[in-house]
Amino acid sequence: MKKTLFIKNTVILTATSLLLRFIGIIFKIWLASLIGSEGIGLHQLVFSVYMLVSTFASSGISTAVTRLTAEELAVGSKKSTVKILRRSIEMSLLIAIVSAAAVFFGAEFIAQHLLEDMRAVPSLKLLPLSLPFMAVSSCIRGYFIARRNVAPNAFAQISEQILRILFVVMLVKKFAAQGLAACCAAVIAGDIMAEILGFLVLYITYCFDKKKIKNLSGRKSPPYKTVAKILHISVPITSGRYLNTLLRTGENILVPKNLSKHSLSSSQALSQFGMIKGMALPVLFFPSALLNSISTLLIPEISEAVIKGRNAVVKSATQNILKLTAVISFIFSAIFFIAGEKIGYLIYKEDDVGFLLKALSPIVPLMYLDSISDGILKGLDQQVFSFRAAISDSLIRIILILIFLPNFGIYGFIGIMYFSNFLTCFLNVKRLLKVSKARLKLSTELIFPLLSAFTVTLTANFLISRIAYYNNLIYIILLSVLSVGLYVATLFFTRTLVTVK
């Protein structure tokens, strides 16, 4: 029954994630056509500040809600389960309000001295309004994941995304003639309205759902103080993500600034930055929806397995998810490498985006494995290690940006991304294998699928190009379908897809 529920939730989350990412990319195409890559770059700068303060307000606490609620549902009581969420919301709200005040009153300083673009001021003034709603929503989402009920989260996210697009389209069209500053502020305003409505959907659903929690037969009260336990889990995660996001925000500020030192104007540098962060990377991460869904759902499952001492379950789950991640990432890496230029031009009508997709395609497996490993490590109470790895990576990236971008421009940044993703992937996967006692066979579970992925994609490309000439859309569809089909058949007949017992 539990396995069926896990599969059902995975399907719901994956379908939701794919839909949201598809809608998001379509929306980015429309937005890029209206405000250009420079406008996308300005929005990414403001969004970096949003990520910084929103991470501080919610990220670790949401994970704490999922882990502690899952434990209480397994061996605890209804009263303790509700108490965990209540205390988490109180803490998140307090942090969110303080963060909102800091950004609102410091908007001019941030725009002038950090972002070095005063066009960001209106957006920074609006941005804090969404933080309290976002903080509470993240806690409730953590609760529903622990409840193994992802439908409310999916419904709220889809509703929020649809409303966001409607609001942004309406507002951007209205303020388009007033320049990039007004357009960027209009996007942020649309985000705020959608965030508020998404919160209302989640909160109303939670009010009905908590009545369904049965009186559990486990311990009457947890063997820990709720606030202290929440802090034990959330502080390392929040500190890590906050410092990491702080450093990444600094990185996002430094990238266009240092690109401009390499024979580019400030406008061109901001455009290149927007192409990388706002256009190419979302496409590269699009296929990872399934993996992100599984990673999210594994946190309560692994937390429950750990508390019940079921180490074999943890080992098996870790081996299978790492194996699945590698298999999926390899084929999409190959497709982006072969067809990246056509995909970039098809989506954004930009040759430079296509170049970036092809250039960054080999690090897709590293990005996917790093992301999934980081999620599982948090379920295994390894948030302190994740904190150290993330901070080390961000510090190294900033140092390399200062050294290489003025001399090598965009090529220097691509090289930095290769090094950074290899470093974090290596550290997180190595730690995960050690903690979970999982094992991966280098030749049959990594090297063979990797070679198979590129072999079948090159074969598919050769066959399609020899049969007839197709426009970009037809070519990409045919290449993807034929490559994936040949790849799955190869792995199936060689028994590479056999799961670990």
Image (spheres, grey):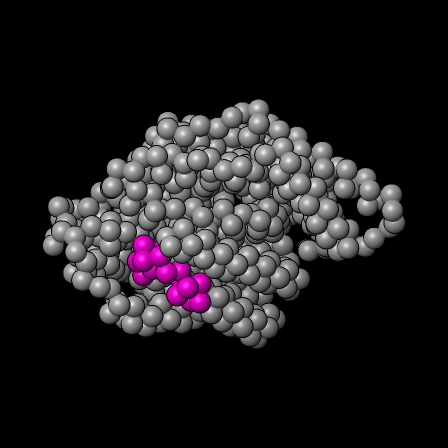
Is 229 in front, or is 113? Answer: 229
Q: Main secondary structure of the magenta part?
A: helix
The quadrant where residue 176 appears = bottom right
Can you give x and y, in whole percent of width and height, for residue 262 in the image? 63, 36
- Identified at 67% across, 33% down, the residue is 452
Magenta region, residue range: 140-156
Quadrant for the N terminus in the image: bottom left
Of residues 399 and 169, the one nearer the viewer is 169
Horizontal relation, residue 230 to residue 16: left or right: left
- Does residue 8 show up? yes
Please, is residue 281 above or below residue 178 in the view? above
Image check: 149 left or right of 90?
Answer: right
Residue at x 62% of width, y 61% of height: 26
Say which quadrant the C terminus sits in: top left
Given residues 277 and 358, the one toward you in this image is 358
**Residue 24: x, y in percent?**
56, 60
Q: Closest to the observer: 138 or 114?
A: 138
| Residue beneath the point at 48% across and 66% down | 158
